Image (cartoon, rainbow, N blue to C red):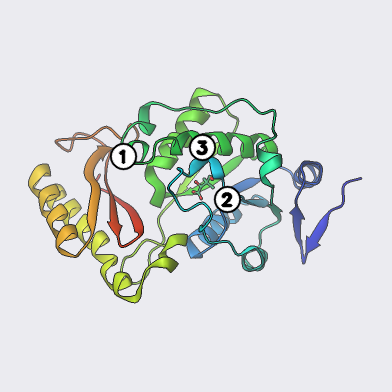
Amino acid sequence: MPEIVKTAAMIIARDLKTLRSAAKSLGALGLVPTMGALHRGHLALVAAARAAGQPVAASIFVNPLQFGPNEDFLAYPRDEDGDLAALAAAGCDLVWLPDVATMYPPDSASTITVAGPALRWEGEARPGHFAGVATVVAKLFGQVRPAAAYFGEKDWQQIQVISRIVADLLLPVSVVPVPTMREDDGLALSSRNRFLTPTERLTAPKLYAALSGAAAMIRQNGDVEPALARARMAVTAAGMTPDYLALVAASSLEPLAALTGPARLIVAARLGRIRLLDNVPVR
Ligand code: PAF
């Protein structure tokens, strides 16, 4: 019999046998996949899964496959004790804590590459990133076998990529997007925000302000390019370097020159050594 470790009512699984036995005993699960360093945004995903009346599983795995060679895999924040305490307090039923050997056994030879919504924006800026995300998320789905999985809208493109693989590979799971949680000044919550210096922290909310201003302008008069140009100028004037700031079709992530259907304004901008991502709905 696998050993099941419980914190209050929460089961902590570190091997597949324990995970499968716990998942089976809990029934149709809502899964919150994470890389740890949890904040209120992650806990809102747990709350959304609980509100759907499901037992909730969260996974914590800093996935090496989705980091490029010059990215911050080693420096990515890790706080297992704090995360477990936060998940227990949030009413999580099961936590899956796999190690690298479990996720990527030495003989594993398959990765999932995604075209369509994965091609542009983060796909261009971070080659290989979405293959890493798609592969690990498909593995997590195969391990936990959840009925639903919850993802934050802050990573809008990631949600579209995951929805694509779920549709293309007929994975039996519902992808549930949850609105972005923000600080009072508008900054989208992110595990990497802790690396902002106090001065950068004052600058960072200007990204959301620029996006919101552009979204309002596009909704009001439909002029996309002037609104984007103004927002790019505002971001640059605040001391950030935009990698992209674009109006895109909400599902395909194709750039839009006019508001012709469901659309999202998306942005990535560098501030010091941090890359900030954000997006807002336009329609
Ligand atoms: O959004 C994240 O934290 C990660 O990309 C995810 C979905 C947990 C996959 O590693």
Measure the alpha-carbon separation of dots 1 and 3.
16 Å
Left or right: 119, with 51 as reference point: left
Q: Where residue 51 appears, x then y in whole percent?
A: 57, 55
The span from disc 2 to disc 1 (Cα, nearest Å) is 22 Å
Which label's residue is closer to the chain start, 2 or 1? Answer: 2
Q: Which mark is residue 132?
A: 3
Quarter of the image for residue 68 reads top left
The residue sitting at the front extreme is 70
The CB of the residue at mark 3 lies under 8 Å from ligand 1: yes
The quadrant in which the C terminus is found is top left
Q: What's under tag 3, amino acid-wise?
A: Gly
Query: What x and y, as percent, mark residue 169?
Result: 54, 24
Picture residue at 55% right of the left edge, 34% below the top: 135
Q: Position of residue 203 (x, y in %)?
A: 26, 69
Q: Could you say which is closer to the camera, residue 211 or residue 218?
A: 211
Q: Earlier in the sequence, mark 1 or mark 3?
A: 1
Q: Is mark 2 within 8 Å of ligand 1?
A: yes
Residue 208 image-quadrant placement: bottom left
- Give SS at disc 2: loop
